[in-house]
Amino acid sequence: MPTIRRRTLIGGALAGLALSASRAPAAPVLRGDDPRFADVVAPGTPLLTLYAQGRWCEGLCYAKALGGLIVSDVRANRMLCVADDGGTRVFRDPSNNANGNTLDGEGRLVTCEHRGRRVVRREHDGRLTVLADAFEGRPLNSPNDAALAPDGAIWFTDPVFGITMPDEGLMATPAQRARRVYRIDPSGTLTGMTEAVGQPNGIAFSPDGRRLYVSDTSAALKNPEGARSILAFPVEGGLKLGAPATFATLEAGVPDGLAVDADGRLYAACFDGVRVYAPDGTRLGRIATATDAANVAFGGPDGRRLFIAAGPCLHAIDLTVRG
């Protein structure tokens, strides 16, 4: 695929913004709620804009072997790869309205597709292998986000956004009676793990794999009674989930993509930026963004760069901690 360099304009209706301009540092907006926030990001650290020409950036996954950060521009129906030097290239077009991405235990890219209503794995030669597209003989809703468990299993969420939002997939009536979190065993077996989340979205494991975080974004469907919370499930033996507890609740908007650093802090993409929580649920602070943040991921050469997808933009900020 051709490389889009910093001074190269992207064609079509998106032409007109150079990557060199989009990489200019923006004034940092760091809001500390707890003194420990300074241990996460140093005061005055700039928030960079790496890319500003997307429609709805999501699905961040740093994959060095593939050339850098993989980004799903869900509503543009394509995926991009942003290199460490800022060079940007088309990675997959069309992408089946791809959303969440993660790496499996062998470093292969696993992608949730809205339009395909499936989870696929990109083999080392570029071929796609379908890991899951149905449960109990019926199509999945629209797989949204995925995470790798310590035992090599892939867990993913399956809300209905890709079949109910016209610009994110193909409209359809849900075939599943529930919106579940699923587990794909390394053997290929698909298991429904919980139906306790109204619209499961972001997903992440604690560093030891004994806790699973899931965003409940029921309120995103214009449901005044819908949830806007992050749930924490105890993981029992890697194969079973205990009863969930509410880890955090938002007063507006919904929590979306999640990431966890090496010390167990949780980073949640929210309507007002990325909220950072201690493992006990204490809110440490916020990295503000001008538009709703949808996804977040660690990466970069030393693992200290936090990437943030926020509407049309891809931001990055260098932390003092590793992902």
Image: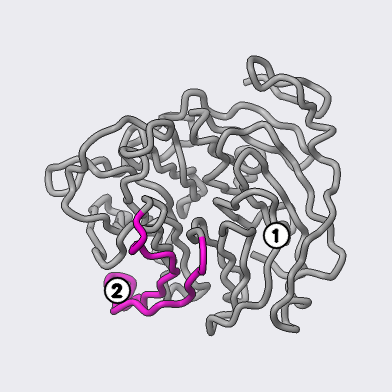
Q: Is residue 158 above or below residue 260?
A: above
Give the residue type that dot 1 points to: Ala
Which residue is under mark 2?
Answer: 241
Question: Which disc, if any, is residue 141?
Answer: none
Q: Quadrant of residue 56?
A: top right
> Which quadrant holds the N terminus?
top right
Q: Quick check: is 251 in the magenta stretch?
A: yes
Point out residue 296 in the picture as x, y percentages from the top left corner: 59, 55
Work out how far the residue at label 1 is from the one at label 2, CA to CA, in angstroms: 33 Å
Q: Which residues are magenta?
A: 223-252
Q: Quadrant of residue 47?
A: bottom right
Which residue is under mark 1?
Answer: 288
Q: Nearer the viewer, residue 253 or 288?
A: 253
Please name the residue shown 41% across and 75% down the image: 232
Please name the residue shown 43% across and 51% down the image: 145
Point out residue 15 in the picture as x, y percentages from the top left corner: 71, 19
Q: Is residue 310 above or below residue 288?
A: above
